[in-house]
Amino acid sequence: MTYCVGVLVEDGLVMIADTRTNAGLDDISTYRKLHHFNVPGERVMMLASAGNLSVTQSVLSLLAEGVPADAEGEAPMRFIEAPTMFQAAQLVGRAIRHVRGIEREGFAAANLRFEVSFLFGGQIGAEPMRLFLIYSAGNFIECSVDAPFLQIGEHKYGKPILDRAMTFATDLYDALKVSLVSMDSTMRSNLGVGLPIDVAVARRNALDLEVSHRIEAGEPYFHDLRERWSAALRAAHRAIPRPPYGPAVR
């Protein structure tokens, strides 16, 4: 299982992803799911993945080496060479469909589902910073000012926190903090999501990463965040009046 979240606010972009992969109770491993494709001063692009690990690795390799064109006679395009964010998102979709075409028969024979999704965000040149969610069919949707975050993987446990706390006007590092609380909530409810956590922050128009960090087990800040959030929830619960239902309180 996986949990990845991308948040696009006025000041910039936050993306975080866990690293746990699970192929059974006795086969738990750590793989990076948040990848960077950067040319400082020209572009900053981040890609987070969820789904079948072999598929995501094949898609990433195609993006690095060059995705075959849909039309005959056209040269393959590398991800880092895409001229716009929209065309880069299309390139991820094309790579997914190319891998599906190669692996379809093998997946069907093994009775496996072709499951993959990506969060893709960043900025190229002077165009606006953007954030996309790309599905296993290769189609995608884009983040909006009214809904400034997107998630993939095990998203249901962390979404209520983002729904309540995240707006387009949220400070960039407050967005990172809320995203980490969202990750903590997911980790507490699903053992298939776990540390280490990869974090990336890019400020709008900087065209470079401002933060690229891995949170390991025992890191003081994340441990403190988890404890403070738990304490805040307990305090909020105690501060809310008792429901006025049932037998009267004497």
Image (tube, helix red, strand yellow):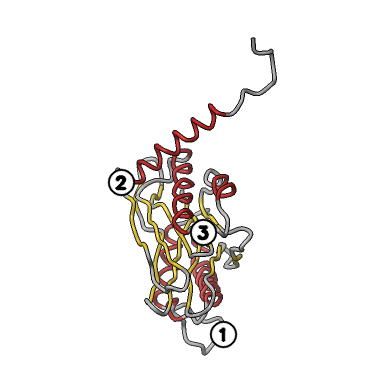
State the residue position of label 3: 7
Q: Residue at x 43, y 55 (%)?
A: 17
* Residue 157 in the figure: left or right of residue 28: right
Q: Residue at x 48, y 73 (%)?
A: 123
First of labels 3, 1 by sequence position: 3
Q: Name the residue nearer the viewer: 186 or 135.
A: 186
Where is residue 159? Give x, y as percent.
56, 47
Q: As shown in the figure, which amino acid type bears the numbered disc 1?
A: Ala
Can you tell which mark lies on residue 71? Answer: 1
Q: As shown in the figure, which amino acid type bears the numbered disc 2?
A: Glu
Q: Is residue 237 above or below residue 226?
A: above
Disc 3 versus disc 1: distance between alpha carbons?
34 Å
Where is residue 164? Give x, y as percent.
58, 47
First of labels 2, 3 by sequence position: 3
Q: Quadrant of residue 72?
A: bottom right
> Helix or strand or loop: what does disc 3 sit on?
strand
| Disc 3 and disc 1 in contact, CB within 8 angstroms | no
Disc 2 versus disc 1: distance between alpha carbons?
49 Å
Where is residue 125? Give x, y as percent.
47, 80
Where is residue 244? Give x, y as percent.
68, 21
Q: Tell which tag, 3 or 1, sits nearer the viewer.
A: 3
Can you tell which mark lies on residue 219? Answer: 2
Q: As shown in the figure, which amino acid type bears the numbered disc 3?
A: Val
| Disc 2 and disc 1 in contact, CB within 8 angstroms | no
Quadrant into which the C terminus falls: top right
Q: Residues within 10 Å of mark 3 (few under 14, many from 20)?
A: many
> Helix or strand or loop: what does disc 1 sit on?
loop
Disc 2 versus disc 3: distance between alpha carbons?
23 Å
